Image: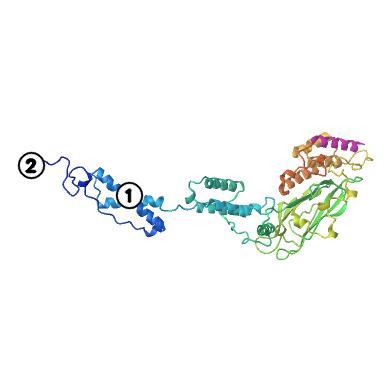
């Protein structure tokens, strides 16, 4: 009798193979249907799909075992394999990924800033609050937005805007509901909330008015005029604010005048401020109201305040409750004024208050220009010719042009006014007055494209430039002066 030989490679035990073919391989015991762990957060559909996936995984494992009979995972390894399969399924098809909410963050930011205007008081503060709220929202959704290009663009954009506006990362944030942050003594806050309620997408409209030099007037309509207006005249007189200026002759025997006194009355406003009066005269530019106070309104956030920028030379007044800013300067012996005010408030006045230089310009009888802002087209506005030697240093057209060009490279109406004032008065301080007036325009005027006015465009409307007309006008002026 021949003894049966043991096959090489065979190993005793329950995993011994007795030959090829599936019939000789013991079938794996049926696996119980895996139950959904309580922490997966999936619904019934997800659970059933996971069970199906697990069954498919076990069938695949059995087939693999039949192909390679020497691999016989112990029960613990099989359990780990099943858990791994469940984990992969849980991270993929068996659970919906967290939603990237970057679009909601962006929508909220737009809602918070749509009513803001860079020309209004408190813009930087409110914009930084909205940026911090935007940054916080992106941080909360960062995990779900790792692969979202819009998210990464938003993060970079927030960082750039914070750097541009000098916003700190720590600080108060805006509420996503503008109504919650409504402040009755902050004009742009309640104006923006009102626009959101009525669905108006137009930004609040602001107007600018300025007076400087001989004097030269820029009205709310961006008309530029040179006027006599000797004595006291109202610049503004509406239901919220009154501004009056007093002009005196600069040169004896000439119609040239300049401002030596400014009186500003902030009218009482319920819950925000009592009436406050400010008065400045030559060599007395106080940093306080007539009653000695420096602010109006209760609480830490004053609805009206005075800020001294340069002692005795430059003060600013910020009236938050009416969205108005006023700059007053002394340059040489005379004063300049610049103001920005919301259009709806600036135009709130009675018929009896129609004499306002900022609204309607100087009366025709008081104008000494050609009606288009060209101060060169003037007759009778020259130094007295009876005196054999003027009492002021003389300027030629070339020297006046050169001095003004140092401060104002753009030869617009401010440059022309500078040259005119030098030729008319001989006072170099008028150069600084024209330059400061242009700086005030750039700081307060809401529309950059209207900062520069070129006289040949008619009625003071802004235009791209006309140096030829300026030169010809000044040549005409110097001819008048030399007669």
Q: Main secondary structure of the magenta part?
A: helix
Is the residue marked by circle 1 packed among few (<14), some (14-19), or many (20+) residues within 10 Å?
Answer: some
Q: Return the residue at label 2.
A: 3
Please name whichever residue, 322 or 381, is drawn nearer the observer in this view of the structure: 322
Element on which disc 1 rests: helix
Q: Are marks 2 and 1 in contact (CB under 8 Å)?
A: no
Note whether 182 is above or below 165 in the view shown: below
Element on which disc 2 rests: loop
Q: In the displayed structure, does residue 248 sit left or right of residue 60?
A: right
Mark 2–mark 1 Cα distance, whole angstroms, equals 43 Å
Residue 57: numbered disc: 1
Please name whichever residue, 163 or 31, is drawn nearer the observer in this view of the structure: 31
Q: Residue at x 82, y 44 (%)?
A: 459
Q: Residue at x 72, y 47 (%)?
A: 447
Note whether 445 is above or below 304 in the view shown: above
Query: Can you name the residue that lies furthest to the left here?
Result: 1
Q: Residue at x 33, y 56 (%)?
A: 34
Residue 246 can be seen in this image = yes
Residue 312 can be seen in this image = no
Note whether 362 is above or below 431 in the view shown: below
Q: Quadrant of residue 185?
A: bottom right
Q: Position of residue 8 (x, y in %)?
A: 15, 40
Query: Can you name the residue that lies furthest to the right here?
Result: 386
Residue 116 on the magenta segment: no
Q: Position of residue 5 (x, y in %)?
A: 11, 41
Is the residue marked by circle 2 packed among few (<14), some (14-19), or many (20+) residues within 10 Å?
Answer: few
Q: Bounds of the magenta span?
A: 467-483
For marks 2 and 1 on the same chain, the one whose residue lies earlier in the sequence = 2
């Amino acid at each position: 009798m021949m003894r049966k030989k043991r096959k090489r490679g065979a190993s005793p035990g329950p995993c011994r193979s007795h030959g090829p073919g599936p019939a000789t391989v013991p079938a794996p015991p049926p696996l119980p249907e895996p139950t959904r762990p309580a922490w997966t957060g999936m619904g019934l559909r997800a659970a059933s799909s996971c069970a199906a996936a697990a069954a498919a995984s076990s069938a695949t494992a059995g087939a693999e075992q039949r192909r390679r009979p020497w691999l016989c995972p112990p029960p613990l390894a099989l359990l780990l394999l099943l858990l791994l399969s469940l984990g992969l399924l849980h991270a993929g098809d068996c659970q919906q990924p967290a939603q990237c909410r970057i679009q909601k963050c962006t929508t909220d930011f737009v809602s918070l800033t749509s009513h803001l205007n860079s020309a209004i008081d408190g813009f930087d503060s409110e914009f930084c609050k909205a940026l911090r709220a935007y940054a916080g929202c992106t941080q909360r959704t960062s995990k779900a937005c790792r692969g979202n290009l819009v998210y990464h663009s938003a993060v970079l954009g927030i960082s750039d805007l914070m750097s541009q506006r000098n916003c700190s990362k720590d600080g108060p944030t805006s509420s996503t509901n503008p109504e919650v942050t409504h402040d009755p003594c902050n004009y742009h806050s309640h104006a923006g909330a009102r626009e959101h309620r009525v669905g108006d997408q137009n930004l609040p409209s602001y107007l600018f008015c300025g007076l400087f030099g001989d004097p030269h007037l820029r009205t709310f309509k961006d008309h530029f005029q040179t006027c006599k207006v000797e004595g006291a005249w109202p610049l503004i007189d509406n239901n919220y604010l009154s501004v009056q200026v007093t002009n005196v002759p600069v040169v004896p025997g000439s119609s040239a005048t300049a401002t030596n006194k400014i009186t500003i009355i902030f009218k009482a406003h319920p819950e925000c401020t009592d009436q406050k009066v400010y008065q400045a005269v030559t060599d007395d530019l106080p940093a306080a109201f007539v009653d000695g106070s420096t602010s109006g309104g209760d609480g830490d956030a004053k609805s009206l305040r005075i800020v001294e920028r340069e002692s005795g030379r430059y003060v600013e007044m910020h009236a938050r409750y009416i969205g108005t800013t006023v700059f007053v300067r002394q340059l040489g012996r005379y004063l300049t004024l610049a103001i920005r005010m919301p259009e709806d408030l600036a135009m709130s006045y009675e018929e009896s208050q129609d004499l306002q230089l900022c609204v309607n310009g100087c009366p025709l009888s008081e104008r000494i220009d050609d009606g288009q802002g060209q101060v060169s087209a003037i007759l009778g506005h020259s130094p007295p010719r009876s005196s054999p030697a003027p009492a002021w240093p003389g300027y030629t057209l070339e020297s006046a042009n050169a001095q003004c060009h140092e401060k104002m490279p753009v030869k617009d109406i401010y440059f022309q006014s500078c040259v005119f004032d030098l030729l008319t008065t001989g006072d170099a301080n008028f150069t600084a007055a024209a330059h400061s007036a242009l700086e005030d325009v750039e700081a307060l005027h809401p529309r950059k494209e209207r900062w520069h006015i070129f006289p040949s465009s008619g009625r003071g409307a802004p235009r791209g430039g006309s140096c030829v007309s300026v030169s010809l006008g000044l040549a005409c002026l110097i001819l008048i002066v030399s007669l």
